[in-house]
Image (spheres, rainbow, N blue to C red):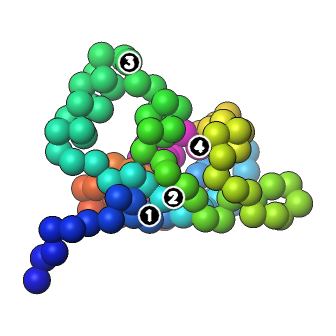
Amino acid sequence: MFKIALTETYEHPITVEIPGDKKKHEFVGIFNRFGRDELDAMRARISADELDDKAFSSEVLAGWRGVRDADGNEMDFTPANLDLLLDIYPVASSIVMAFYASISGAKLKN
């Protein structure tokens, strides 16, 4: 059975490999769910250089689990905390890759 009523968001893992850091950092992204027309419009904005990785990440990410501050405390998903996270290279591009992997069904290599 396929139920048409879908949730507005869904979870998918995000892996970030920071240059010079030997370990992979992982957290769970809570992504907004988009329809085909919305995704096509986003692709067109990307092609027209109207949407970079940081702006794209801000649009598709609705929350997270597993993002912690320097003391190990879970950080709330807020616009200010999202800006802090997206300022870390290459978090924004990692979110973009995870989002497209989530909608294509592809699995990222470890």
Q: Secondary structure at mark 2?
A: strand
Q: Amino acid at mark 3?
A: Glu
- Verify whether residue 67 appears in magenta: no
Q: Quadrant of the N terminus?
A: bottom left
In primary-sequence order, the first of circles 1 and 3 is 1
Mark 4 and mark 3: span between their CA atoms? 19 Å
Which of discs 4 and 2 lies nearer the camera? The answer is: 2
- Is label 1 in a helix, a strand or a loop? strand
Instruction: Provide the residue span drawn in magenta.
Output: 91-97
Which of pointers 2 and 3 lies earlier in the amino acid sequence?
Answer: 2
Q: Is residue 93 magenta?
A: yes
For marks 2 and 1, the one nearer the N-term is 1
The residue positioned 44% from the left and 63% from the top of the image is 12
Residue hosting label 2: 29
Q: Is residue 65 left or right of residue 94?
A: right
Does residue 83 lie above or below 68 as drawn? above
Q: Which residue is mark 1?
A: 12
Looking at the picture, which amino acid does disc 2 mark? Answer: Gly
Amino acid marked by disc 4: Val
Relative to 41, does residue 74 appear above or below in the rendering?
Answer: below
- Main SS class of the magenta portion in the image: helix
Q: Which residue is mark 3?
A: 50
Residue at the spot of label 4: 91
